[in-house]
């Protein structure tokens, strides 16, 4: 079996890459170790940057997104007994975020790919990458897929990055001393926009997935046991961290999903080795505080699509050679923003009274200064895509 681009992973990065390549007349095959049902139900990110929304709409997979996505023109920073709105419509006119679950993006992309006759292989096993220098191929389940290039879109724990010879990639990593306990609840959101709450008890986030489904996160210690958090305790702690401003009451309801996610920062440099290109979580992980994971994957895929398009049009490898450098500029900017948001809003056990007061002082600066608030807003809605050479 042969194709032009072999794609490992049917998450947002792999599916969008296949879709965009198809629009340029470039063939691909997607290999995914999980079932279709699993990837379509896997709850992950839910905040789409303006550029991500534009990419999906312009490529023809945004109809349901435009119909069901929740457009937000601001977020609230809640601390010290008061809420402070960061107004996107004032600070970054014409740019906003859209709340639309990652699993919904995946459903839309799978439907579009299958409607176009794409070859997506779910539940494949024994995936391995070979001969990256000149004639790459992928083996899986006793079969072989020959291709010109391989796109590793298989996440942090995938097989793509480990297939690069030792010493080629340098990794940068930071583990945070806390995790996020996240829940989906069958209850209408208690606010119209996202609330980022900083308290002495720890961080909390009020988000949503639809007018009927809410999403919440609680800062908990790293390695926390989910069994220690029955529903009653979760709601009590959310109320303690969110009901800190006059007149706000948190609505509660049936918890339909919950889990604990560790927070880490990770970057692999370079994002390319020979004919293997890494994209999305296979190359970088950010704390979810900045809402950048899915959006960075989309940015990677846009660059890779253009680079491959130029190669097949005239044989030019210039943009392929620049792929890693171009992507990493945005990756490191997002890493800084995500780290900044995380340290700004979370409670660290190592903080003394000085550290806690310093954190409050900086929050005061962000909410009082248009310049500081604009920096937050610009990064949150997503920086414009770089003009490619």
Image (tube, rainbow, N blue to C red):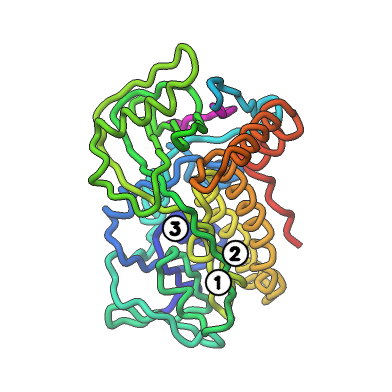
Is 326 magenta? The answer is no
Asked which secondary structure carries label 2, the reply is: helix
Question: Could you classify mark 2 by the number of other residues whose Cα lies within 10 Å: few (under 14), some (14-19), or many (20 or more)?
Answer: many
Range of residues picked out in magenta = 66-78
Residue that numbered label 2 is attached to: 304
Q: Which mark is residue 265?
A: none
Frontmost residue, 311 versus 359: 359
Residue at 59%, 54% (x, y): give it: 299
Number of labelled discs?
Answer: 3
Frontmost residue, 29 versus 377: 377
Which image quadrant for residue 25?
A: bottom right
* Relative vertical location of residue 152 with respect to residue 252 in this rendering, above or below: below
| Observer able to see residue 6 | yes
* Marks 1 and 3, the one that precedes in the sequence: 3
Task: Tell me whether the residue at label 1 lies in contact with that at label 3, contact meaning CB atoms closer than 8 angstroms.
Answer: no
Residue that numbered label 3 is attached to: 15
Quarter holding the C terminus?
Answer: bottom right
């Amino acid at each position: 079996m042969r194709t032009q681009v072999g794609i490992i992973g049917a998450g947002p990065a792999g599916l969008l890459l296949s879709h965009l390549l198809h629009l340029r007349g470039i063939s691909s095959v997607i290999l995914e170790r999980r079932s279709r049902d699993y990837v379509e139900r896997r709850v992950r990110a839910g905040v789409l940057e303006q550029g991500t929304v534009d990419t999906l709409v312009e490529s023809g997979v945004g109809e349901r997104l435009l119909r069901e996505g929740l457009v937000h023109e601001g977020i609230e920073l809640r601390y010290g007994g008061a809420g402070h709105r960061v107004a996107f419509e004032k600070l970054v006119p014409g740019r906003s975020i859209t709340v639309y679950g990652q699993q919904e993006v995946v459903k839309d992309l799978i439907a579009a790919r299958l409607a176009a006759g794409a070859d997506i292989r779910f539940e494949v096993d024994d995936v391995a990458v070979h001969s990256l220098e000149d004639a790459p191929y992928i083996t899986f389940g006793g079969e072989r897929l020959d291709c010109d290039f391989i796109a590793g879109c298989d996440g942090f724990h995938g097989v793509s990055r480990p297939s690069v010879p030792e010493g080629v990639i340098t990794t940068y990593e930071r583990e945070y001393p806390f995790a996020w306990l996240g829940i989906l609840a069958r209850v209408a959101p208690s606010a119209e926009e996202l609330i980022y709450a900083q308290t002495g008890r720890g961080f909390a986030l009020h988000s949503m997935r639809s007018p009927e489904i809410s999403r919440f996160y609680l800062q908990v210690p790293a390695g926390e046991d989910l069994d220690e958090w029955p529903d009653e305790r979760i709601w009590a702690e959310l109320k303690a961290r969110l009901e800190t401003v006059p007149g706000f009451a948190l609505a509660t309801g049936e918890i339909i999903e919950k889990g604990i996610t560790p927070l880490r920062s990770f970057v692999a440099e370079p994002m390319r080795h020979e004919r293997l290109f890494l994209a999305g979580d296979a190359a970088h992980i950010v704390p979810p505080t900045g809402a950048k994971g899915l959006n960075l994957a989309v940015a990677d895929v846009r660059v890779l699509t253009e680079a491959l398009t130029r190669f097949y049009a005239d044989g030019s490898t210039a943009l392929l050679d620049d792929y890693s450098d171009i992507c990493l500029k945005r990756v490191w900017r997002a890493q800084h923003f995500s780290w900044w948001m995380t340290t700004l809003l979370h409670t660290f056990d190592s903080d003394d009274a000085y550290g806690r007061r310093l954190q409050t002082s900086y929050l005061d600066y962000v909410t009082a200064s248009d310049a500081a608030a604009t920096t937050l807003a610009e990064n949150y809605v997503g920086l414009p895509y770089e003009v490619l050479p």
